[in-house]
Amino acid sequence: MEATTEMTDTLERTVKSIQESDTSLSSAHTPAFVAISLSTGPEGGHLDGWFTYIDNGYGKVHIKSEDLIEHTGLFAGVHASALAQLPPPGEFAGKPGTVKASGGLFGGSVSFYDHNNNLIGQFPVTGPGTPSWSFKAHVTYTKG
């Protein structure tokens, strides 16, 4: 019984510490739908997607890979989510950015960065792939 109380107290302290130190989401972040498709293989790779903000004043941002920096392995996958927390598009739309993705057999993760290399968002992708794959490219964020 005492071990359970001690574990609960430790967990509560850990959660509180994470909440107090988490500065990744500013109060300026707003909900958006996210849709991404990603593929990489011997001939190169491509990413395409949309951030669709719930606030109609923000609209949509189209994401498209432009210059492939590096890639390994094979992967073809997608991500779709509702209510991701993203910075307002004015902070990154119309400016170049970077996308980095990596994973394994059944999926991985994709991270979007702005022109200052600040993280915009990170999302899981699902789909078939080789045991190890990666993708890194310059992207454009176009308000649409």
Image (tube, helix red, strand yellow):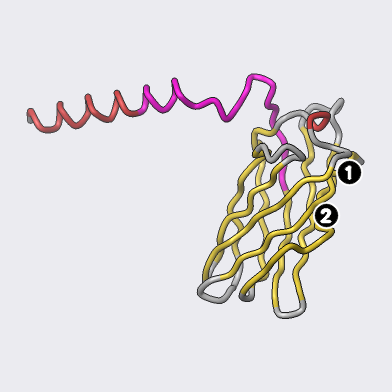
Q: Which quadrant holds residue 17?
A: top left
Give the residue type that dot 1 points to: Thr
**Is 118 placed left or right of 21 in the picture?**
right
Q: Secondary structure at mark 2?
A: strand
Is 36 on the left-hand or right-hand side of 131?
right
Mark before the other along the chain sequence, 2 or 1: 2
CB of mark 2 within 8 Å of CB of mark 1? yes
Task: Quadrant for residue 95, please give it.
Answer: top right
Q: Residue at x 82, y 61 (%)?
A: 67
- Quick one: label 1, few (<14), some, or many (20+) residues within 10 Å? some
Q: Which residues are magenta?
A: 15-34
Residue type at mark 2: give it.
Lys
Quadrant containing the C terminus in the rendered view: top right
> Does the magenta portion include 27?
yes
In the depicted structure, whether residue 36 falls above or below residue 77: above
Q: Residue at x 78, y 54 (%)?
A: 138
User: Does residue 35 lie above or below 41 as drawn?
Assistant: above
Question: For the point 58% across and 53% down, which residue is it?
Answer: 124
Q: Residue furthest right?
A: 144
Which labelled disc corresponds to residue 142?
1
Residue 64's disc is: 2
Residue 68 location, x and y as percent? 77, 64
Eyeballing the image, is 108 above or below 15? below
90 over 99 or under it: above or below: above
Q: Which label was assigned to residue 46?
A: none
**Image quarter of residue 115:** top right
Q: Position of residue 3 (x, y in %)?
A: 10, 32
Q: CA distance from mark 2 to mark 1?
A: 8 Å
